[in-house]
Image (spheres, rainbow, N blue to C red):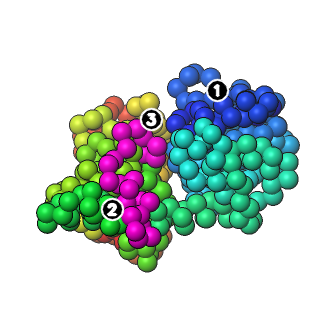
Amino acid sequence: MIAFLGQGRMGVPMARRLSEAGHQVTTWRRGTGVPVAAAVDGAELVITMLRDPAAVREVLAAALPGLRPDATVVEMSTIGPEAVRELRALLPASVKLVDAPVLGSVAPAADGTLTVLAGGDLAGVRDVLAVFGTVRECGPPGAGAAMKLAVMSALVPAQVLLAETYAYGEAHGVDRDALAEVLSGTPLGVLAERLRTPAPETRYALGLAAKDLTLAAWPSATLATAARARLQEAEAAGLGDHDVTAIAAHVGGRPAHRAVPINPATVPATNGFYSHAVRVGDMLYVSGQAAFDSSGQLVGEGDMAAQAEHVFQCLGRILADQGAGFEDVAFLRTYLTNMDDRVAYGQVRRKYFPGTPPASTTVEVSKLFMPGLLLEMDAIVALP
């Protein structure tokens, strides 16, 4: 039996192909109330196709009680090689892990013409992966995940570049169709045609493209970093669920917004009256982070260490979303409801700032916005 975890745009047609190929498939999606551990119970093969590294970690951690000791997990999301290593540490040693992200969108997923970039030992899963399309063996565990991000580091910025190319042409009176025709005779021709008229249906979501470039960020990736900023601007304007080609209409020759709201899916959602952070140029302003979970429930009631740990983890995920780390924090402000808790708070803080600390202020307040909260923390960050 195969358990397929994730029934989004890609997961649905991929699971359907497995069923049509004669495999017994159990599907699972978030929000149905079905425990993921129950969905994987008895499955020899578990496939994940989820949004990002945080989602994969969360779902597989919840699946652990139901995993067979001899199961194989095939991770097909785009999460990067570091996340694959984290999954290897999370899963029992007896559980085999293969990373196999795909190149292609919804239509190739439906007709079985994806390119599967596989890392690790494919014995026992090669035929299953072939149901999705052409399987390319990339090397040891993590190699498939690295290959996927390397490819997206070229394809996604190229589309942003072409969006700006069309915007330049429009601003200077160049006919769009004529420009597309000229570009068709260059190595960029296929992508130029794709960007000429943004796709009405979502094949590869703009928000996912921004996420992929965030995962692929590295210090010298200047073009990818600039493209990511453009995509995040479009995402903040409400285009995250549109096809990535919507960037062409968004750019449209307009100046970029100077303040770009940032609300990563890796931290509990806000109440809608503020954003988790706002990026302005190479500075990031992080709103007050507090210890509540994705359901809005308090974490670590009465326990300063537990609440501080949760808050620092949330801050870390926001930093990671922008390619930054705790070493990039320029200023940290902490509000405590009882200054006597500062020792317990300080012990946790030193884990995240073991060296020279940032500029900071710690103040005592009478209460915070949710009963039971012991601290709240905001920050100013210099982005890499």
Quadrant of the rendered structure where residue 220 is? bottom left
Name the dominant secondary structure of the magenta segment.
loop
- Proximity of marks 3 and 1: CB atoms separated by less than 8 Å: no
The three-letter code of the residue at mark 2 reads Glu
Q: Secondary structure at mark 3?
A: loop
The three-letter code of the residue at mark 1 reads Pro
Residue tagged 2: 181
Q: Earlier in the sequence, mark 3 or mark 1?
A: 1
User: What range is drawn magenta here?
Assistant: 184-205
Q: Residues within 10 Å of mark 2 (few under 14, many from 20)?
A: some
Percent across and percent down for residue 44 are: 82, 37
Residue at point 40%, 38% (across, down) = 201
Quote the CA–CA distance across marks 1 and 2. Answer: 52 Å
Q: Is residue 320 magenta?
A: no
Question: Which disc number belongs to residue 35?
Answer: 1
Quote the CA–CA distance across marks 3 and 1. Answer: 17 Å
Count of number-bearing discs: 3
Q: Earlier in the sequence, mark 1 or mark 2?
A: 1
The answer to whether residue 277 shows anywhere in this view is: no
**Circle nearer the viewer, 3 or 1:** 1
Percent across and percent down for residue 241 are: 38, 40
Question: Is the N terminus in the top left, top right, bottom left or bottom right quadrant?
Answer: top right
